[in-house]
Image (spheres, rainbow, N blue to C red):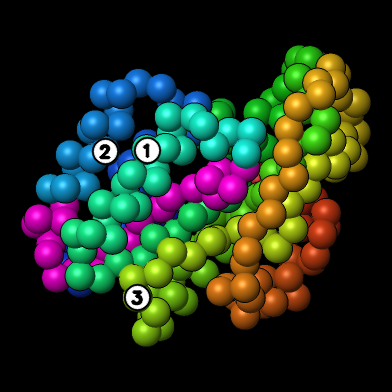
Amino acid sequence: MAKAFSNYKTNKDVIIFAAGVSNSTETNVLEFQRETALLEATIKKHPNALLIYFSTCSIYDASVAHRPYVKHKIEIETYIKEHTKANLIFRVSNVVGPQGNAATILNYLVDAICHDVEIPLWKHAERNLIDKDDLKLIVENLIKSDVRNQTINVAFRESFLVSDIIKQIELFLNKKARFQVVEKGNSLKIDTTKISDSLDKIESIKGTGLQYIFNLLEKYY
């Protein structure tokens, strides 16, 4: 995330806080404390700046909302609202970008299928994917606008069953996945009305529905 917004590195009016915990399965309390301390120091150093913070859409997923990572993000959101003059909190879905973080859902699925590793497939689980470049476009549009002190979801309009995402990967790789179906998971509903104009432009270029997922595979894999 930090690399995507490196053009703001010397901007004293807009602070992109991109040094937070990024692994949604993180349980190490020290990692959460590190982020909190760094955030507090950043706000103290730049009291008049617009603070940009990246939270998570996992807040809307009942199957993972109990995780320490999600609870930590909610606590951080509250702190920002209470201690900054101007902020934009972006609740982000699963970001897809150049391969790197193996913990991201698409990287994990592609790697598992490529290496013939069995996937525990949560039957009812849905995931929402957003291109790193689309995320940046949406965030920068809002930074340039007059919108302030709001919590905004940054996600694609549709969330997809993990099984449907796997089918797109199978088509792309021309390789069958190995998976064991597990009776777990929930639907994932994310309100994207606040970014509808940006999504209209993105969909006009990259397509709607599962076409967007296939576009991500062609772009990054």
48 falls in the magenta region: yes
Task: Residue under label 2, please give it.
Answer: 35
Task: Residue under label 3, please give it.
Answer: 148
Q: Residues within 10 Å of mark 1 (few under 14, many from 20)?
A: some
| Furthest residue in direction left, as rendered | 45
Residue 191 in which image quadrant: bottom right
Asked if one can make out residue 99 in the rendered structure from this viewpoint, the answer is: yes
Q: Residues within 10 Å of mark 2 (few under 14, many from 20)?
A: some
Q: Earlier in the sequence, mark 1 or mark 2?
A: 2
Q: Is residue 137 left or right of residue 74?
A: right
Do residues under tags 1 and 2 come within 8 Å of each other at their CB atoms?
yes
Q: Nearer the viewer, residue 47 or 15?
A: 47
The kind of residue tagged 1 is: His
**Residues shaded magenta:** 42-61
Do residues under tags 2 and 3 come within 8 Å of each other at their CB atoms?
no
Image quadrant containing the C terminus: top right
How many numbered callouts?
3
Q: Earlier in the sequence, mark 2 or mark 3?
A: 2
Residue 192 at x, y percent in the picture: 62, 67
Q: Residues within 10 Å of mark 3 (few under 14, many from 20)?
A: some
Check the image and report above or below for 82 versus 147. above
The kind of residue tagged 3 is: Arg
Q: Nearer the viewer, residue 40 or 137?
A: 40
Q: Secondary structure at mark 3?
A: loop
Residue 77 at x, y percent in the picture: 35, 52
Q: Residue shown at 78%/48% (left/top)?
A: 160
Check the image and report above or below for 192 versus 18. below
Residue 88 in which image quadrant: bottom left
Q: Earlier in the sequence, mark 1 or mark 3?
A: 1
Check the image and report above or below for 194 versus 67. below
Q: CA distance from mark 2 to mark 3?
A: 23 Å
Q: Is residue 88 left or right of residue 119?
A: left
